[in-house]
């Protein structure tokens, strides 16, 4: 059992022999390369945000437009969705009934959509206060950075729907399993971006 | 299938530990800002520190990046990307703040 110690849940695709394990690791490494290039995009938007932060041109400032309550709630929802996706991966690895796998994926989808709804509500509140992207350099960089994460979550939700359909139509064959693993990496990765977002954007803006 | 069941229980426990740690770290970070535990600069330092620790927790418990052999290549890729990101972000901030300073 020591060979699979610490391995990604689900790595035993159908036949848990060494070659299948290695192929899975190679496939997931390719996805890691994509994730890290995505991380570079986010990092540079963070740098832009940091530079633009003082450029409010007499318009809304971070302290006036951010609210700590919704940001905290969004964080809790996203963390919980990562946990439910983890339970889905474990259920998939151990060949649990398909109903349970789909249940955890469905729970993740609902949480992801709830997160998006709250985020859109936040943006609407900001728009109502005149905080629109065209107002200042600070708001332009804010609306380049935060909605890009939201767009990723929306893409993740769409991908979740596609994977749930594939689990129903094709069953848990090798391809469906490995794509679900990729989606898992993507979903957990978005959580890490969100940690940076709530620390650097929301909490920094709200510190007095 | 008892060993598989034991494996599953161990993995669920690992995710649960990660989830609890993440909740605690998030709670501390938001709490530090909400209750203004320290001066602005110190609070921002605390928030950044807690954020970094939480990222490590997520990599370890959710993304299964460990020091073990099975994720060695992934770990090296992540560390190298982190280096590149640190160089680009800090370089951007230093140069543009310096420029800003000179334009004043």
Image (cartoon, coloured by chain):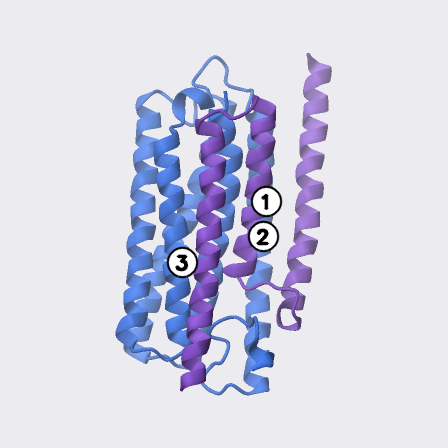
Chain colours: A blue, B purple
Task: Say which chain tag 2 marks.
Answer: B
Task: Say which chain tag 1 marks.
Answer: B
Whole-percent x, y for residue A98 in the image: 29, 76
> Quick check: B99 above or below A142?
above
User: For mark 2, does the 10 Å Cα neighbourhood hold few (<14), some (14 to 19), or many (20 or more) residues?
Assistant: some
User: For mark 3, does the 10 Å Cα neighbourhood hold few (<14), some (14 to 19), or many (20 or more) residues?
Assistant: many
Q: Quadrant of residue A160?
A: bottom left
| Marking on residue B52 | 1
Are the residues flagged by discs 3 and 2 in contact, CB closer than 8 Å? no
Q: Is residue B79 left or right of residue A203?
A: right
Asked if one can make out residue A144 in the rendered structure from this viewpoint, the answer is: no
Residue bearing the label numbered 2: B56
Residue bearing the label numbered 3: A83
Q: Nearer the viewer, residue A6 or A15?
A: A6
Whole-percent x, y for residue A137 in the image: 51, 24
Asked if one can make out residue B24 in the rendered structure from this viewpoint, the answer is: yes
Distance of mark 2 from mark 1, alpha carbons?
6 Å
């Amino acid at each position: 059992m020591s060979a699979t110690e610490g391995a990604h849940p689900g790595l035993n695709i159908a036949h848990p022999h060494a070659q299948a394990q290695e192929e899975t690791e190679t496939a997931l490494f390719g996805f890691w390369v994509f994730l890290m290039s995505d991380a570079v995009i986010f990092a540079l938007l963070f740098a832009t945000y940091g530079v633009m932060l003082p450029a409010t041109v007499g318009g809304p400032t971070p302290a006036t437009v951010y609210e700590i309550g919704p940001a905290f709630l969004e964080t809790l929802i996203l963390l919980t969705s990562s946990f439910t996706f983890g339970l889905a991966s474990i259920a998939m690895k151990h060949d649990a009934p398909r109903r349970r796998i789909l249940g955890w994926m469905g729970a993740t989808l609902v949480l992801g959509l709830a997160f998006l709804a709250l985020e859109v509500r936040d943006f609407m509140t900001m728009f109502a206060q005149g905080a629109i992207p065209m107002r200042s350099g600070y708001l332009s960089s804010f609306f380049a950075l935060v909605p890009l994460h939201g767009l990723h979550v929306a893409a993740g939700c769409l991908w979740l729907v596609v994977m749930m359909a594939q689990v129903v139509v094709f069953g848990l064959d090798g391809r469906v399993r490995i794509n679900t693993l990729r989606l898992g990496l993507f979903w957990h990765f978005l959580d890490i971006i969100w940690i940076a977002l709530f620390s650097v954007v929301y909490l920094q803006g709200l510190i007095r | 299938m008892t060993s598989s069941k034991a494996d599953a229980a161990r993995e669920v426990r690992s995710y649960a530990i990660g989830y609890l740690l993440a909740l605690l770290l998030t709670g501390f970070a938001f709490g530090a800002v909400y209750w203004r535990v320290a001066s602005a600069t110190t609070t921002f330092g605390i928030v950044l520190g807690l954020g970094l620790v939480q990222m490590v927790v997520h990599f370890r418990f959710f993304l299964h990046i460990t020091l073990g052999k099975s994720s060695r290549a992934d770990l090296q890729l992540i560390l190298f990307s982190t280096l590149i990101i640190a160089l680009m972000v800090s370089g951007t901030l230093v140069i543009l703040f310096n420029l800003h300073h000179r334009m004043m």
